[in-house]
Amino acid sequence: MLSHSPHFQESLDKRKEEGTLRCLKLQSDGIDFYSNDYLGLAKSKDLQHLMLEKVINSPQLLSGSTGSRLISGNSDMAVSVEKDIAQKHQFESALLFPSGYNANLALFSTFPNRHDTVIVDEQIHRSVHDGCKLSNAKKLKFKHNDTEDLENILKRQEGHCYIAIESVYSMEGDFAPLQEIASIASTYKASLIVDEAHAFGVFGYGLIEKLQLQNHVSAVVVTYGKALGAHGAAILCNETVKSYLINFASPFIYTTSTQDFQWMSIKTGYEFLDQNHELAEKLQNNIKVFRSRKLKSPSAENSPVQAIVIPDNQKLKELQNILSGEGLLTYAIYSPTVKEGSERLRICLHSFNTEEEIIKLTGIIKEFI
Ligand SMILES: Cc1ncc(COP(=O)(O)O)c(C=O)c1O
């Protein structure tokens, strides 16, 4: 029998006892209040047909890329999609990655050196923490969205600092004070990096583009697995930063490039998004319906992620089970993924949810709490 460390079983048993054991489940049938498919593009038959047409005309899109982009894996498709993306977001350049996780890993393992400090919002995505672990930089956390705390930390640092934030936070569903943080970064000559995973597509091309903050950031990450219904990510930056990543980012260099199909699906997704602005409007209408039901939530008024704090793992599980019994699929986030006492039901709203579905969902939650 293959052996493993005895602590594996102990850790799994502990999670089981606490009711927090993770396991892979097939998607259940039901009303989607849990996926990141905010605009329904992952289900769109029209988008599927557009991609299918391109594949039929060019079946080579489906084949492997044969190597790292620095050896045999680069392609006209990758280069032209990067050019388009940079232009759309009004950045000098863009660099594609197979996922947002990979993009953050590349950025945070490569940008800071061992004399630098990365200051992250305490709710930053795990991929940023993992990237920092691969660098030898010091990492400090500032209190969620607390600019005073951020400034106090910056004041005490000696080397170069990087600030890592998300424009829309995935657990809390609130916004970062982007303009204020950009101004603090400029005062302390720190480099600002913004992850737009949950803003891209929901708020046009993201909040950096909306607020025209392109010249105030070192890099922005946009991901395509959420509102675009596809897969992948791009780092938006200037030419020097792109060249630095191509030369020094291990997660970019030492891996076989993604097949052209993925880059094509991103390109087609952008075209679809540009022609279907009403989807983001429908989503905003549904968020309004949800908010009109007056459930207590730390999330922003117009955020696609609405969190309902149920500060007890068992109670939270009970509510989630009641909802799923009614065919309403939500996602429960237990401690230790979030701090003890802030366990929550994470509700994702979509353009395709109906008013009746939202009223049913909120009605059950109201009755429970
Ligand atoms: C804020 C944030 N950044 C990055 C990622 C990772 O993106 P991807 O799912 O494309 O790897 C996610 C998704 O979980 C996310 O929520």
Image (cartoon, rainbow, N blue to C red):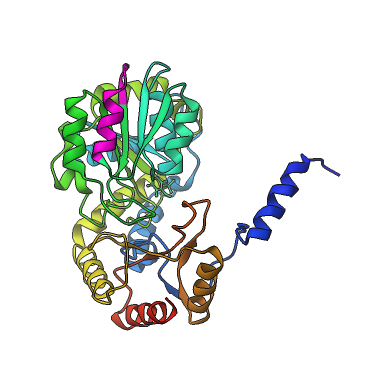
Depth check, front residue: 176 or 254: 176
Majority secondary structure in the magenta region: helix
| Residue lying at 17% horizontally and 39% vertically, measured from the top left | 180
Query: Total of numbered circles in the picture?
Result: 0
* Residue 133 in picture, x, y percent from top left: 49, 29
State left or right for residue 90 relative to residue 28.
left
Residue 189 in sight from this viewpoint: yes
Residue 265 vs 117, above or below: the answer is below
Does the segment drawn in magenta span residue 159? Answer: yes
State left or right for residue 8 relative to residue 143.
right
The image quadrant of residue 73 is top left
Depth check, front residue: 106 or 309: 309
Quarter of the image containing the C terminus? bottom left
Residue 173 vs 166, above or below: the answer is below
* Residue 351 in picture, x, y percent from top left: 29, 69
* Residue 173 in picture, x, y percent from top left: 32, 57
Depth check, front residue: 199 or 366: 366
The image quadrant of residue 193 is top left
State left or right for residue 204 relative to residue 138.
left
State left or right for residue 215 relative to residue 14.
left
Quarter of the image containing the N terminus? top right
- In magenta, the rendered stretch is 147-161
| Residue lying at 72% horizontally and 45% vertically, measured from the top left | 8
Residue 341 vs 133, above or below: the answer is below
| Residue lying at 19% horizontally and 66% vertically, measured from the top left | 281
Work out which residue is located at the far left of the displayed protein and give it: 212
| Residue lying at 22% horizontally and 37% vertically, measured from the top left | 86
Residue 68 in sight from this viewpoint: no
* Residue 80 in picture, x, y percent from top left: 28, 37
Does the segment drawn in magenta span residue 350? Answer: no
